[in-house]
Amino acid sequence: LGRVASSQVSSVEQRLYAHAAGQFLAIQIEASVHPGCSGGPVMQDGQVVGVVFQSLVCADKRAHAVPTPVVQRFLADVAQHGRYLGPCSLGASFQMMMNQQLRQYYNVPERLRG
């Protein structure tokens, strides 16, 4: 039997999933998740709001969960197409321009940030 622990949500943001090729919406929770215990539900008011999928070994009591809408999308894709198609894509990418040499190469004015 598993054990029940309470935790708090630290953030909801785009995160790189450990076993995925991209960033997706993730819930960061303040809870100890032992290795091998991922896959458990994250509950709020008796409802499943996510599934624990990775913890940060270097950070005590910090883990991430896949939010329910992402799980529902995965299950709908598999049910309808027999595989996960993933979210749609605009086909665009971006590059942070924090590196001074990169900013100079592309003639980015000093007043612009990003």
Image (tube, helix red, strand yellow):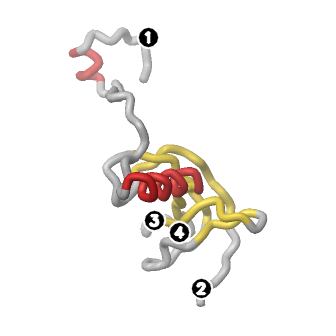
On the image, the x and y values in percent for residue 6 come to: 70, 71
* Residue with the mark numbered 4: 60
**Cα separation between marks 4 and 2:** 20 Å
Q: Amino acid at mark 1?
A: Arg
Comes first in the chain, label 2 or label 1: 2
* Residue with the mark numbered 1: 111
| Point 66% across, 64% down: residue | 48
On the image, the x and y values in percent for residue 45 come to: 78, 64
**Cα separation between marks 1 and 4:** 39 Å
Kindly indicate the quadrant of the structure image that contains residue 17.
Answer: bottom left
Comes first in the chain, label 4 or label 3: 3
Give the secondary structure at mark 3: strand
Give the secondary structure at mark 2: loop
* Residue with the mark numbered 2: 2
Residue projecting furthest to the right: 45
Name above or below for residue 86 compared with residue 6: above
**Cα separation between marks 4 and 3:** 13 Å
Q: Nearer the viewer, residue 25 or 99?
A: 25
On the image, the x and y values in percent for residue 51 come to: 55, 65
| Point 50% across, 71% down: residue | 39
Comes first in the chain, label 4 or label 2: 2
**Cα separation between marks 2 and 1:** 54 Å
* Left or right: where 88 falls relative to 26: left
